[in-house]
Amino acid sequence: MNGNGLTWKDGVPVSDRFNDPYYSLDDGVAETTHVFLDGNGLPDRFHDGFHIAETGFGTGLNFLVALQAWRAAKVQGTLHFTSFEAFPLDAATIKAAHARFPSLRDLSSDIDWSQHHITLPDAILTVVIGDARETLPQWGGLADAWFLDGFAPANNPELWGDDLMAAVGQHTVQGGTCATYSAAGSIRRALDAAGFNIARVPGFGRKRHMTIGTKR
């Protein structure tokens, strides 16, 4: 069991700890596509060895949507996906969270979500367990794209601090990108200080704006 309290609202898991849904109550797949794929210029930038890194693995929905896009783009090679998660959900909860998305059910059923290092024929998923403020700075990798997807900054400030955003910048290739649903000024300033050229663009659904960036 994951030990995380959650409540289901219209089939969407809502964290009791952070008082926030794990993905959009309207359409989690559409949100991920708009914010994280489109926001990072994907799938157009995909290439063999492309590395996505993420703060907040949650239900793994972002990974599934990225993997689906990778396969649809018929990229030859391996997608790398590294996510930092302090409070991992159990496999049954993850699969239940995916059940509302028919296009992802078969993809999800092929994955053993109880494992934190998963090798597929065309992708490698690594979920780093622990406080990202400690684990991310120690990570030896460099990301081509970041999915910054912690719970709302007001509820989960630990995943949005200046020091952590600086570590994100340090672990991004030159010309790499980041995207987040948040348009908070403090986060945009922190990402700018971390070496990203920042832009505020239209958000998903009821969110008026979101943030994207390119590493200088």
Image (cartoon, grey):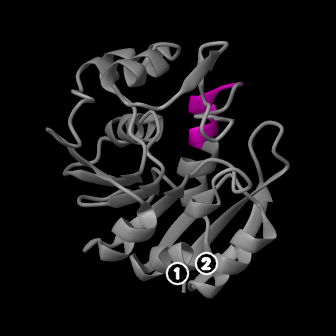
* Residue 209 falls left or right of residue 65: right
* Residue contact between numbered discs 1 and 2, judged by CB atoms under 8 Å: yes
Query: Where is residue 24, by image quadrant?
Result: top right
Query: Does 58 sit above or below residue 136?
Result: above
Q: Amino acid at mark 2?
A: Asp
**Label 2: few (<14), some or many (≥20) within 10 Å?**
some
Query: Does 165 sit above or below residue 101?
Result: below
Q: Secondary structure at mark 2?
A: helix
Q: Which residue is mark 1?
A: 166
Taking the spot 37% from the left edge, 42% from the top edge, the residue there is 73
Query: Does 121 sit above or below residue 92?
Result: below
Report the front residue among 43 and 144.
Answer: 144
Taking the spot 41% from the left edge, 36% from the top edge, the residue there is 60
**Label 1: few (<14), some or many (≥20) within 10 Å?**
some
Residue 29 counted in the magenta span:
yes
The part of the chain drawn in magenta is 26-33
Residue 164 counted in the magenta span:
no
Taking the spot 64% from the left edge, 37% from the top edge, the residue there is 31
Which label belongs to residue 162? 2
Q: Position of residue 181 (x, y in %)?
A: 68, 52
Q: Secondary structure at mark 1?
A: helix
